[in-house]
């Protein structure tokens, strides 16, 4: 018997084995006709195109306007009025004469005026609302940062999923090619009576299983490609190799926990929500304070709806008003109690966020360490499986192994290489997960070649705007 009795000739086998080795390395997998595309390029595309991220940026800009709304309470309120029309009068008056005097006629009337109101004191409500709005703006920025991290992590995961599934797809294609060659040679040997029908059935079964695995790999690849387009917003090009980002994370678990507690946007958002709830309690309490306002009115009238003899009237008033609440049915007290309960809830939410971040950091760190160990294990598994396949083929050549033994060894090698591809994928994704868990997954830290979004620009554009309905971007 020769080696060709149980597999392809040595030249073919070595070529297939080289293809399997190449496809097992994620960085060597490419496809398509587009220019090479790195993971950093994909992250930059997602940062610019992802609709979820752009939606959150719009929400942040909308929150900026809360400060302008709060500041408006300290500004005067001015209203202009104008009226005009035709007035008909029929009056009967008694002015001490024996006979009453009747006056009838029509007169055109018109008037215009200005009314201005300025609040001088309302229980420090205006200043409290401004502080609350500013906290809401900062909280919105932290929510945006959290969304940025989620989108970048999803983009990195989608990129690596597509790279992994393309590598596994190539592995399965190469495996089917080997199995087809094996079946063809087994069928030839069966026709000359060198092997039994059992050997032929085993080769046919292995090929059917290989084709089934190939179809599954094709399905996974198409799914990952669709997910890539959804997250990144562009069709994948020729994907290049990727590397872990461990250098941006703390070197150990305690350091990661400390950074996560200080920098994770989920925690900072929860802290700001506590500040917002504190200010809401003060706003509710301000309903118990007196209010002081200044009202001014100017009115010019032509004609009079009461007398035909009045031609013009000019009036102006400036009035100070003090309002002291005594009892309004108890709603203000219920509002205060409600705000205090909400404050307690926000403090509990902060504790929950801290525990969730701590758990996420520990879990991500554990997954990263497991992925590192998995790479070492699967690398050794691939080496051993390759040696075992060579040994089984040599033993089969001298009659000590069967066709099934060769096929099983071949499938063990393919499985080992698929496991190595998956371990390399998990290693890189886990490094991004750790970076996100500690709150450091950002385009600035990653060094992405893209202009980053600065939410403070819009805030300063609208904070002190007294008039205008157009947004800074022209809408």
Image (tube, rainbow, N blue to C red):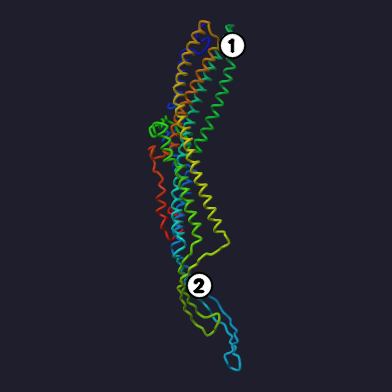
Residue located at (61% from left, 14% from top): 201
Residue sitting farthest toward the bottom: 98
- Where residue 450 appears, as percent x and y from the top left, is 39, 41
Residue 157, visible in the rendered structure: yes
Marked residue nearer the N-terminal end (2 or 1) = 2
Image check: 87 left or right of 23? right
- Between residues 391 and 323, which one lies in front from this camera angle? 323
What residue did someone put label 1 on? 199
Residue located at (38% from left, 34% from top): 248
Residue located at (53% from left, 11% from top): 6
Q: Quadrant of residue 220?
A: top right
Q: Quadrant of residue 193?
A: top right
- Where residue 418 appears, as percent x and y from the top left, is 50, 23
- Where residue 200 appears, as percent x and y from the top left, is 59, 12
What residue did someone put label 2 on? 82
- Between residues 358 and 266, which one lies in front from this camera angle? 358
Task: Report crowding for label 2: few under 14, some 14 to 19, many 20 or more residues within 10 A (C-alpha).
Answer: few
Q: Nearer the viewer's eye, disc 2 or disc 1? A: 2
Image check: 190 left or right of 456? right
| Real-space CA distance between mark 2 and mark 1, rounded to the nearest whole angstrom | 102 Å
In this rendering, the answer to whether 89 lies above or below 185 is below
In this rendering, the answer to whether 421 lies above or below 184 is below
- Where residue 68 appears, as percent x and y from the top left, is 44, 57
Residue sitting farthest toward the front: 326
Which disc number belongs to residue 177? Answer: none
Mark 2: secondary structure: strand
């Amino acid at each position: 018997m020769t080696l060709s009795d149980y597999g392809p000739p040595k030249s073919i086998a070595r070529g297939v084995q080289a293809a399997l080795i190449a496809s097992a390395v994620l960085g060597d997998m490419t496809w398509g006709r587009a220019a090479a595309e790195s993971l950093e390029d994909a992250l930059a595309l997602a940062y610019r195109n992802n609709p979820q991220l752009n939606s959150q940026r719009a929400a942040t800009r909308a929150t900026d306007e809360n400060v302008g709304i709060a500041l408006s309470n300290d500004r005067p309120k001015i209203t202009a009025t104008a009226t005009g029309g035709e007035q008909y009068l029929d009056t009967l008056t008694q002015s001490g004469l024996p006979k009453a005097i009747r006056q009838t006629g029509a007169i055109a009337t018109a008037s215009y005026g200005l009314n201005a109101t300025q609040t001088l004191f309302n229980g420090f409500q205006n200043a409290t609302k401004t502080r609350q709005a500013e906290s809401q703006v900062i909280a919105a920025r932290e929510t945006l940062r959290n969304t940025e991290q989620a989108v970048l992590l999803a983009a990195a995961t989608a990129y690596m999923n597509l790279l992994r599934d393309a590598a596994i797809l190539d592995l399965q294609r190469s495996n089917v090619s080997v199995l087809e060659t094996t079946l063809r040679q087994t069928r030839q040997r069966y026709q000359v009576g060198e092997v039994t029908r059992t050997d032929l059935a085993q080769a046919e079964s292995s090929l059917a299983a290989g084709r089934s695995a190939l179809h599954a790999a094709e399905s996974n690849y198409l799914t990952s490609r669709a997910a890539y387009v959804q997250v990144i917003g562009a069709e994948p090009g020729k994907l290049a190799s990727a590397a872990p980002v461990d250098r941006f994370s703390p070197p150990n678990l305690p350091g990661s926990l400390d950074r996560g507690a200080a920098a994770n946007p989920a925690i900072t958002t929860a802290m700001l929500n506590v500040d917002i709830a504190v200010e809401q309690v003060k706003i509710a309490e301000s309903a118990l304070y007196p209010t002081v306002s200044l009202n001014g009115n100017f009115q010019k009238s032509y004609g009079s709806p009461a007398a035909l003899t009045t031609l013009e009237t000019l009036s102006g008033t400036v009035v100070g008003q003090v309002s002291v609440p005594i009892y309004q049915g108890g709603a203000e007290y219920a509002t205060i109690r409600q705000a205090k309960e909400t404050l307690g809830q926000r403090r509990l939410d902060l504790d929950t966020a801290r525990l969730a971040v701590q758990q996420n950091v520990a879990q991500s760190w554990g997954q990263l360490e497991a992925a590192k160990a998995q790479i070492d294990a699967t690398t050794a598994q691939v080496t051993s499986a390759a040696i075992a396949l060579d040994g089984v083929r040599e033993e089969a050549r001298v009659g000590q192994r069967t066709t099934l033994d060769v096929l099983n060894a071949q499938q063990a090698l393919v499985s080992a290489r698929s496991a190595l591809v998956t371990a390399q994928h998990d290693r890189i994704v886990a490094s991004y997960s750790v970076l996100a868990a500690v709150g450091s997954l950002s385009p600035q830290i990653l060094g992405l070649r893209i202009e980053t979004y600065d939410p403070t620009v819009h805030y300063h554009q609208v904070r002190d705007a007294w008039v205008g309905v157009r947004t800074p971007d022209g809408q």
